[in-house]
Amino acid sequence: MQQGGVSKATKTLNLSEDIFAGMDFVLRGGGRTIKHREYFHLAKGRDLGFNTVLAFFSKLSSGAGEQLITRQTLRLGSLLPLPEFLSFYYAHMGHYLSQWAVSWGLPVLTLVWLLILLNGCEDANDLSIKCSATGQSAASVMAEAWQYIYSGNLLIVFLLAQMAPIFFEVWMQAGLVTSIIRLVKQLLTLSPIMFIFQAKVIGFYTMNELKYGGATYVATGRGLPTERRPFVGVVTDSGRLQPGGLYLDYARITYYDGAALLLLMVLVVVAGGMDNTGPQLYGIMVSLCLVTVSWLLAPFIFNPYQFRPSCWANDMKAWLQFFLEDGGSHWKKWFTQTQLKPRRGFRATILDTWKHAAVAAYGAGQT
């Protein structure tokens, strides 16, 4: 009972079952060792399609969010020496938290950029930029800041650090030429867009589990990755709509945030953020465009037969039925399950109240 007792039987804690079992094993101590055996079975495979991979990551992320608040994590954090703790953190929960931080870093910085542009150079406001001495505008000050962040050397080091692990692994296994070809293929097949979207999904499910809970098992299946995923559903032979598609899967995860980021970019341009800046903003604009395209279009880019005209016609028909069939019951049910239900409960109320209070406090400070 001192190791968690019946609470360890909670099904949501075991969504990442191998990780949680390892945490319990380490806590038992006593010099125990684990014998690991691999079994290979004929025809045992997994679908590596876009949606299946992200469904698998959503399950792992939800399980990691549940494990973050367990007593096992608290004990490991208190008892492990610093090197072992850092190894445990970055190999497990740190990975999921960093995906959330990376995903939200650029939108938050863009919002700060917009606030600085709107704040201007009024010396009466202590929070504004002091431009009177230098004669620089807020746009030029921010352009210099972005140019420093996206300087050539820093950007090259960051990109190399991201690509180095798989590059050296393939190099050791298959040789240098194969490693270079593999890296070029990944870039040509738009893997950066895939990984940007994947980071957003991982961060969303991890933080959503911390805020609202409600983790569930996600069946990934063993289907073929060549099957096309519809937009909102499929119209059956009887003329009825069977809901389920890309928009329903990712609307609250990436589409809404992608649209908000696109709106921020437009507001930055309207507020004069691009005036007289020259090539200083190339780096940040490329990053913003990559993130926006990934969050809004990645599911459609990697969806087989997405741009076939006949499939478009079926998607349009299903989209109309999604809103009009049975008095709009389909979209009402989807909205209730995905938007309203996860935000109920005491924990969700406290966190949302704190978030709104922080925004109100910032607005009061500005005035």
Image (cartoon, rainbow, N blue to C red):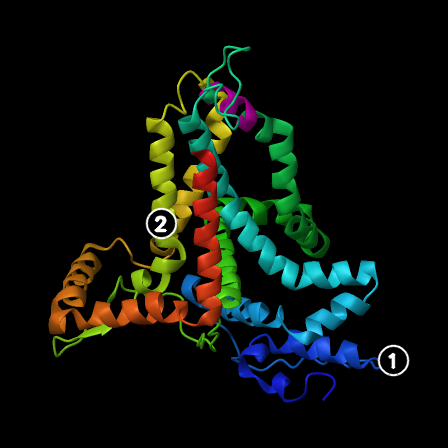
CA gap, disc 1 to disc 2?
A: 50 Å
Q: Main secondary structure of the magenta part?
A: helix
In screen coordinates, is 256 left or right of 185?
Answer: left
Mark found first going from the N terminus, 1 or 2: 1
Picture coordinates of residue 211, whole percent (x, y): 50, 65
Picture coordinates of residue 163, whole percent (x, y): 62, 46
Label 2 sits on residue:
296
Q: Quadrant of the N terminus?
A: bottom right
Q: Is residue 54 visible?
A: no
Q: Please, what is the three-letter code of the amino acid marked with disc 2?
A: Leu
For residue 324, what is the image quadrant?
bottom left
Q: Residue at x 42, y 34 (%)?
A: 367
Q: Foreground: 229 or 43?
A: 229
Decide: is 293 above or below 211. above
Label 1 sits on residue:
31
Decide: is 39 above or below 228. below
Q: Is residue 124 magenta?
A: no
Q: Is residue 141 magenta?
A: yes
In screen coordinates, is 150 left or right of 231?
Answer: right
Image: magenta residue range: 139-146
Residue at far right of view: 31
Near mark 2 (Cα within 10 A), the count class, few <14, some 14-19 or many ≥20, is many
